[in-house]
Image: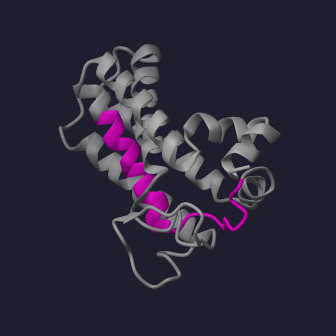
Amino acid sequence: MQSPPYFWPAVSVILVIGQGILLWFMGQVPICECGYVKFWHGITISSENSQHIADWYTFSHIIHGFAFYWLSKLIFPKMHWGARLALAIVAEAGWELFENTDFIINRYREVTISLDYFGDSVINSVFDTLWMVFGFIIAWRFPFMITVALAIAFELWTGFVIRDNLALNVVMLLYPLQAILDWQGGI
């Protein structure tokens, strides 16, 4: 039986709203404690990083969308793309919830240059998931090699500009290297 055309978009919206509600119950601030919301905040070593709609880490979330699209298409080739998107939202929202636990917040502060990181605001975290959705849709609509080129460009650009990117973030969380920490700190 085929789902109505609005079914998967409705599921996706409910999942993202649920993520926001859970983050709020976890004690995350709804918006930046500065009292306003900006579309872009480009200063990474700042109390406003991860508090607004977009920042340098937005590019990592778009890459998450590429990866979730490719993985879901590989693992579930016959599944409706809307169902695969809902699974991707579950994965991204799950990471966002885990990322805002004391365990991960403290890990970031221990092994990265993010010494003043206290977690994402609810609006930033929800938009991180929406940026992933954007990346998923790009990967769904564009040829594989275009999304590969975009992912490489995003990684190189953010690595150059802020000395951090998705790959470095994963390495530093899982197996921190002093050489990377020194380079990120400008030493």
Residue 153, x across and y down, in percent: 40, 31
| Nearer the observer, 179 or 4 | 179
Going 53% across and 81% down the picture, which residue do you hit? 33
Residue 177, x across and y down, in percent: 79, 37
Over which residues does the magenta segment extend?
Answer: 113-137
Residue 141, x across and y down, in percent: 22, 27
Q: Find the residue positioned furthest to the left.
A: 5
Quarter of the figure that contains the N terminus? top left
Colour scheme in use: one colour
| Res. 176 in view | no
Picture layout, residue 82 above or below residue 126: above
Residue 155 on the magenta span: no
| Nearer the observer, 108 or 99 | 108
Going 44% across and 27% down the picture, which residue do you hit? 152
9 on left or right of 155: left
57 on left or right of 146: right
Residue 113, x across and y down, in percent: 71, 55
Question: Which quarter of the picture shows residue 103?
Answer: bottom right
53 on left or right of 75: left
Q: Find the residue positioned furthest to the front.
A: 187
Question: Which quarter of the picture shows residue 23?
Answer: bottom right
